[in-house]
Image: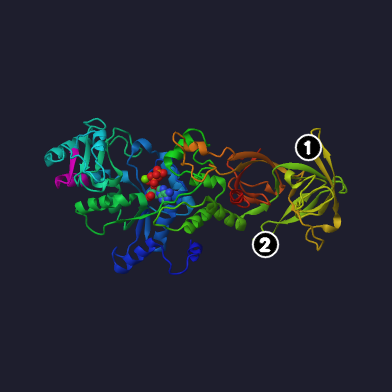
């Protein structure tokens, strides 16, 4: 992470760093920085969560503090162990460590219950027997006060008794709630006697059926921060209006020591995708994608399978920065970050995705030459690989044109190109099939032009593979999942899924130079002139499967300019 810090001019701190620096200078937090990442285990993490992870863990690293992982598991009907495990895996993969501090809001259910009892005793909370609909209907509007609950002034003893019986399972779901007694006329709707507990007879993945009342987010969250000694509770902007409630709860509990404070930053929004867990779940459950880790998903597991590196995601998070106002980041920035990483770090391979046969008429039948090819021009120290060359090759179909326009520097009749790492060849004639399609391109080569020698130059250089040596692979050509910038912008009655890109997955049968043999799932390569690819876990001994991580250049930018 040191690398990334360098990209900011020294002394330029984002607003959270400024707050923390000041707190440390003024001794507001006893010299401590303690943050937390609080996911609800109701889905897989996405790139927005990655931003929050990099921020919370990053601040702890930068200020010699700590960052907890806390599962906000207060809604048992939507949560599961599968999600818990995927979240842990993703955070570790991103390169962050919560050490032994793996916590669960459910660990605090007893403490939270006791705290709620203390609020009832102070007359600051009461059991309300209005239904959920009645409470919602009675909330009022920001300019008109809400309806006062008929139960608001019931005796403390009565609330205490019923609250205990709620816990003991005496009442059905939805029949009663515990509410904070604040202000039904507050212009802040969150302060209008918010619900603290609801009855839900549901099994919890950790507490099983020990509880049938569950705390609401606003009640559980701040108190969990307090229990964990969090100093800076960082969340996204939509919680700004919840902050008075966050503070009210702490004000009204007799808390000792440093109180956590909440700070809000703008959530990460990306174009050409969706990031709400509800929508992502819909894509998964409806079979619109092949699971949470489908390489087209903006999930961390999807990006991993697509071939993204943790370093690229961390660099992206850093480049996005920390904003105080909502904005939308261009997907091209994320793609730029992975290209930058893979350009530096991925070995090169020759792969032909749409092959057409090319025969070198003057090359000896049966001869094979091993040609030297650099593994990675960005890292010459990694040395060379050997690529076999022979009489019969494949090149990319669109690298040949029988009747080319003026500036076509690839292959056409009578013209010369260089075959990368090999020779200059000249197209002599073509053989067509019955439909007029090109079946074979016949060329001659100039033996004096072997690559590496000081020879004459030609304008075009093509990639190729030797027909007898190439390894076949299934290549999954992924593209953006949606073909509009804001998929949620739909007309009345429309659906965000109407904006899905029908060409987001196309499959090709690629031919790859044999040095690919022995590669394992997860390994990443640049297919020269084509893009960045990685080996999918679907690969087996019989069949290699590659995913396209990114094209070599930003093809969307060009398209949008048209
Ligand atoms: P969703 O609204 O899609 O269900 P969520 O925000 O409810 O997501 P949580 O599991 O509660 O999901 O999020 C855990 C943490 O990640 C929270 O602190 C939340 O603010 C943060 N987070 C979620 N989405 C983003 C985002 N797009 N950008 C930055 N932080 C995010
Ligand atoms: Mg949330």
Give the label, 2 or 1, closer to the camera: 1
Label annotation for residue 551: none
Residue at (80, 48) in percent of width and height? 412
SS under mark 1? loop
How many neighbours does mark 2 have within 10 angstroms: few (below 14), some (14-19), or many (20 or more)? few
Does residue 498 show up? yes
Residue 68: image x %, image y %?
37, 53
x and y percentages locating residue 53 in the rendered image: 42, 53
In this view, 508 is above or below 317:
above
Question: Which of these two is toward me, 164 or 17?
Answer: 17
CA separation in Å, label 2 and label 1: 41 Å
Which residue is found at the position 49% from the left and 66% from the top? 6
The reply, left or right, for residue 457 in relation to residue 14 is right
Residue 122 shown in magenta: yes
State the SS at label 2: helix
Question: Ligand 1 within 8 A of label 2's CB?
Answer: no
Q: Are marks 2 and 1 in contact (CB under 8 Å)?
A: no
Residue 64 visible here: no
How is the model colour-coded?
Answer: rainbow
Would residue 135 be counted in the magenta stretch? no
**Stretch of the chain drawn in magenta:** 115-127
> Which residue bears the numbered disc 1?
437
Q: Position of residue 344 (x, y in %)?
A: 61, 58
Q: Position of residue 273 (x, y in %)?
A: 50, 44
User: Residue beneath label 2, please?
Assistant: 380
10 Å neighbourhood of mark 1: few (<14), some, or many (≥20)? few
Q: Residue at x 29, y 49 (%)?
A: 242
With respect to residue 372, does 398 lie above or below?
above
- Give the side of residue 316 with respect to residue 119, left or right: right
Question: Picture quarter containing residue 459?
Answer: bottom right
Query: In the image, 496: left or right of 416?
Result: left
């Amino acid at each position: 992470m040191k690398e990334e810090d360098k990209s900011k001019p020294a002394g330029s701190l984002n607003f959270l760093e400024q707050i923390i620096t000041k707190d440390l200078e003024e001794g507001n937090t006893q010299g401590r920085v303690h943050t937390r990442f609080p996911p609800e285990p109701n889905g897989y993490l996405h790139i927005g969560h990655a931003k929050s992870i990099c921020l919370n863990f990053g601040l702890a690293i930068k200020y010699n503090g700590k960052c907890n992982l806390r599962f906000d598991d207060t809604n048992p009907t939507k949560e599961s162990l599968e999600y818990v495990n995927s979240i842990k895996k993703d955070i570790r993969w991103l390169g962050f460590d919560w050490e032994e501090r793996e916590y669960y809001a459910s660990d605090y259910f007893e403490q939270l219950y006791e705290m709620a009892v203390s609020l009832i005793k102070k007359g600051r909370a009461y059991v309300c027997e209005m239904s959920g609909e009645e409470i919602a209907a009675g909330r009022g509007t920001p300019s008109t006060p809400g309806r006062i609950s008929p139960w608001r002034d019931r005796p403390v003893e009565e609330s205490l008794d019923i609250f205990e019986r709620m816990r003991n399972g005496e009442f059905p779901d939805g029949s009663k709630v515990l509410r904070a007694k604040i202000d039904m006329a507050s212009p802040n709707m969150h302060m209008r006697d918010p619900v603290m507990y609801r009855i839900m007879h549901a099994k919890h993945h950790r507490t099983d059926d020990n509880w049938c009342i569950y705390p609401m987010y606003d009640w559980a969250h701040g108190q969990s921060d307090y229990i964990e000694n969090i100093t800076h509770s960082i969340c996204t902007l939509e919680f700004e209006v919840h902050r008075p409630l966050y503070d009210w709860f702490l004000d009204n509990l007799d808390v000792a020591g440093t109180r956590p404070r909440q700070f809000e930053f703008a959530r990460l929004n990306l174009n050409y995708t969706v990031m709400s867990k509800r929508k992502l779940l819909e894509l998964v459950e409806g079979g619109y994608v092949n699971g949470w880790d489908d390489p087209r998903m903006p999930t961390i597991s999807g990006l991993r399978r697509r071939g993204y590196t943790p370093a690229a995601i961390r660099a992206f998070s850093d480049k996005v920065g920390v904003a105080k106002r909502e904005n939308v980041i261009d997907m091209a920035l994320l793609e730029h970050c992975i290209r930058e990483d893979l350009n530096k770090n991925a070995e090169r391979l020759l792969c032909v995705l749409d092959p057409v046969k090319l025969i070198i008429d003057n090359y000896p039948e049966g001869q094979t030459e091993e040609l030297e090819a650099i593994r990675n021009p960005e890292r010459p120290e990694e040395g060379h690989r050997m690529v076999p060359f022979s009489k019969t090759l494949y090149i990319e179909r669109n690298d040949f044109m029988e009747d080319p326009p003026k500036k076509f520097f690839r292959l056409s009749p009578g013209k010369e190109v260089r075959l990368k790492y090999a020779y200059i060849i000249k197209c002599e004639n073509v053989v067509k099939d019955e439909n007029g399609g090109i079946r074979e391109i016949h060329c001659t080569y100039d033996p004096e032009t072997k690559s590496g020698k000081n020879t004459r130059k030609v304008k075009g250089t093509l990639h190729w593979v030797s027909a007898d040596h190439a390894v076949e692979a299934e290549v999954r050509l992924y593209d953006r999942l949606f073909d509009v910038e804001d998929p949620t912008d739909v007309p009345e009655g429309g659906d965000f899924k109407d904006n899905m890109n029908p060409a987001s997955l196309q499959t090709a049968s690629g031919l790859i130079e044999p040095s690919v043999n022995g590669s394992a799932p997860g390994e990443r390569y640049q297919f020269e002139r084509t893009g960045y690819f990685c080996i999918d876990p679907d690969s087996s001994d019989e069949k290699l499967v590659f995913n396209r991580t990114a094209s070599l250049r930003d093809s969307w930018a060009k398209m949008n300019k048209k």
